[in-house]
Amino acid sequence: MIDIDKWTEIYNTVKKHKLRTALTAFGVFWGIFMLVVLLGAGKGLENGIVGEFNIAKNAVFVWTQRTSVPYMGLKAGRFIQLTNDDVAAIRANVPEVAVIAPNNQLNGDFAVHHETKSAAFTVRGETPEMLQVRPIKISSGRFINQKDIMERRKVAIVGPRTLELLFKDIDPIGKYINIKGSYFLVVGAFEPIGKGEDIVEDSKIIYLPITALQQTFNQVNKVGSLALTPSAGVPAAVIEDKVKTLLMKRHHVAPEDIKAFGSANIEQEFQDIQGLFTGIAGFSWLVSIGTIFAGIIGVGNIMLIVVKERTKEIGVRKALGATPWSIISLIIQESVVITGLAGYTGLLAGTGIIATIEYFMRKFDVQAGYFGIPEVNLGIALSATILLVLTGALAGLIPATKAARVNPVVALRDE
């Protein structure tokens, strides 16, 4: 049941000392405000950087380099060529690999032609598994399928840059492009996923079935690099080590030769970034809680002054039979109200700012460098609310205990 008298007393006390209460409560307001804004901004930075990851977050890439150590009568400086047989060996001997996507690329200077138009593009041979490692959006037609691989079909999937330079205002599906004297049927068009320089470079790619590229351009059995992802629950580092060890054995590379095969572990990079954002969030909580704690001290000081000013009143209450708990609850309730209102106002102000920034960034599709769309999740709001209640009770605990210990006789003599 609501005690109107208690709420009236609280209102009168706050009203009597408006400036003092407002200045002290500002510390709590600012702490919650900073917490929401810093965490929201940190989430925006995380969204922006994670958005740059346009590949599977547990992917591993493996490619060949030159050996640096002589081994089994073979000289250092030997270049290693990956093959289709290596792909088959990995599938057979490394069960932890869930997806393996071999690829190759045409090198050298050449132009791709369609009728009278021509331009330079990056031509890559891929398999259908590529979409599980580096997803793209198929805007029309289709991507490479398994039948294309098996039958070495001469088909192509083109990107935005190809559409702009070779097929402007023309539907490319069913048209042919000439790549180094060989014709490929366009069966699909795609849009790259990602941001920044990566999306610019990816828009210039033309995808072919890797088997068609190998056969057409005299690269039979040649693979340029491998993209892999592990089975569920398996760390990417496990398949990275096992695949490189297997390839070293197959190509007679010294076990200690760390330069023969290059690799990139995207999972490890992603975990490092996640650790960075965990640190940013922790720092935000630390700064904000420090500010809130300063506000708590201020509110506690206010309540001590209130208790001092109302010593005679408290003595009268106790003389008339008021219990210690009724005195404690009155002081704590007043403290919770001050911190609660100040903190909740800070919560609304911080959330409002983040929501406004989010609204305009979504509406106008804006991203400031690596800063993405900021967010304030429900967990943060609930945590902040619980923090307000606890800090309010804590701020009033010592003054309330002091009030409960007031001796009625001494209090009535107080001037």
Image (tube, rainbow, N blue to C red):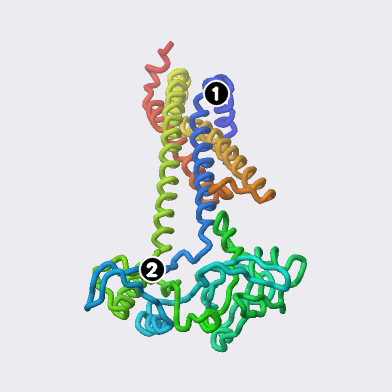
- Give the quarter of the figure containing the C terminus: top left
The location of residue 401, given as percent across then percent down, is 38, 30
Labels 2 and 1: the sequence-earlier one: 1
Name the one closer to the observer, 323 or 19: 19
Furthest residue toward top: 415
Label 2 amino acid?
Ala
Which disc is residue 380 wearing?
none
Q: Give the distance between the C-alpha atoms of the residues marked 2 and 1, in whole angstroms.
A: 62 Å
* Quadrant position of residue 193: bottom right
**Residue at the spot of label 2:** 236
Any part of residue 179 in sight: yes
The location of residue 410, given as percent across then percent down, is 37, 17
Mark 1, Cα crowd under 10 Å, few <14 / some 14-19 / many 20+, is: some
The location of residue 149, given as percent across then percent down, is 55, 84
* Quadrant position of residue 116: bottom right
SS assignment at label 1: helix
At 45% across and 41% down in the image, what residue appears? 284
Furthest residue toward bottom: 151
The location of residue 96, given as percent across then percent down, is 38, 77
- Give the quarter of the figure containing the N terminus: top right
Name the one closer to the observer, 32 or 356: 356
Which disc is residue 13 wearing?
1
At 45% across and 83% down in the image, what residue appears? 221
Residue depth check, mark 2 versus mark 1: number of the one nearer the observer:
2
Label 1 amino acid?
Thr
